[in-house]
Image (cartoon, rainbow, N blue to C red):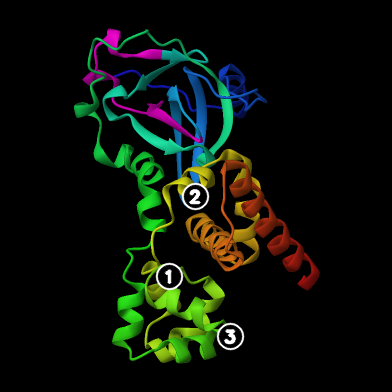
Amino acid sequence: MVDLRPLTRDDLVAMARRISIPQSRAVEGRRRGQVWRASWSDSSSLVVLLDVGLNAVSAAPLLLDFDRSSFEEKQLSTFSGISCLVVTSHSREIAEITLDGCFGEISLPDEFTDESGGDNVAIDELADFDLLAGWLSEASGDGTLGEKLRRAGLTPPSVAEALTVTRPTAVAILRGQQPLSKHQAELISEPARLTAEQLLAANPSLPTEWLLELKSGAYRSRVKEFARRRKLTDIEGWRDVGYGAFALAARQNTKDGAGRLQARVDAFLNAALGEASADA
């Protein structure tokens, strides 16, 4: 057995200088082959973009720390001089709003002819990526709000009184046609005999066009700031912004095209953050 001398501080410094750590960079737009860090709430993962759509991307997890003995050389790629694995067999769609920073690009074939060996990757190594791809289902309501309120004996007059809204609005809420904002859920939680979180989880699902708009990366910094000021997770903050903007648009009872949807979300966020700043 060979005795190795202990590493000195100079040895550690020399080793650190040989390590190349990729830095995030400013880029214009998203495109295939870019390497991004996706982070949302407590989940974070390096991903490679495989296809770019409207406010969403198809991505595969990029692993730098894995058991290389389980893979053939042809299954591996290189990123910033580091051997890595792009788990293309585990590709999923993720919302653009989860993309945090671009760290460069990686060469990808036009088509993937070989499996990436995803079966040899431990499930826990892909857990964060799966959460990044699946959080939208957690943020969407199950549509049972009206049923739950009626089961608690609430009627249009009692809902209107508890929330200080008009009778038609109360009827729409009881019919499951209009969601509750977080503030409204807190106001009605006692007569409904449910927590505000339970009521929010029962909200009607946001329309498809709203879900698509709210995936946009343009809202990332403001949604995260909204969540931070209210001590919410990113998912909770996104949900409250979505339902808050949608409820505001529903009360104003106007038709919304794509441009109007953006204006609605912008107006809600600007008002909410301005209000929070004034209270700070």
Is 90 located above or below residue 270 in the figure?
A: above
The reply to whether the magenta stretch includes residue 58 is: yes
Q: Residues within 10 Å of mark 2 (few under 14, many from 20)?
A: some
Q: Which mark is residue 178?
A: none
Task: Say whether disc 2 or disc 1 marks the residue closer to the N-terminus.
Answer: 1
Q: Residues within 10 Å of mark 3 (few under 14, many from 20)?
A: some
The spot of residue 260 in percent (x, y) is 62, 47
The quadrant in which residue 247 appears is: bottom right
Residue type beneath disc 3:
Thr
The spot of residue 91 in percent (x, y) is 32, 29
The quadrant in which residue 19 appears is: top right
Q: CA distance from mark 2 to mark 1?
A: 17 Å
Residue type beneath disc 2:
Trp
Q: Residues within 10 Å of mark 1 (few under 14, many from 20)?
A: many
The spot of residue 132 in percent (x, y) is 41, 43
Q: Which residue is mark 3?
A: 164
Pair 2/1: label in front:
2
Task: Say whether disc 3 or disc 2 marks the residue closer to the N-terminus.
Answer: 3
Residue type beneath disc 1:
Leu
Q: Quadrant of the N terminus?
A: top left
Q: Which residues are magenta?
A: 55-77
Is 112 located above or below residue 8 in the figure?
A: above
Given contact means CB atoms under 8 Å apart, are the residues at marks 2 and 1 in contact? no
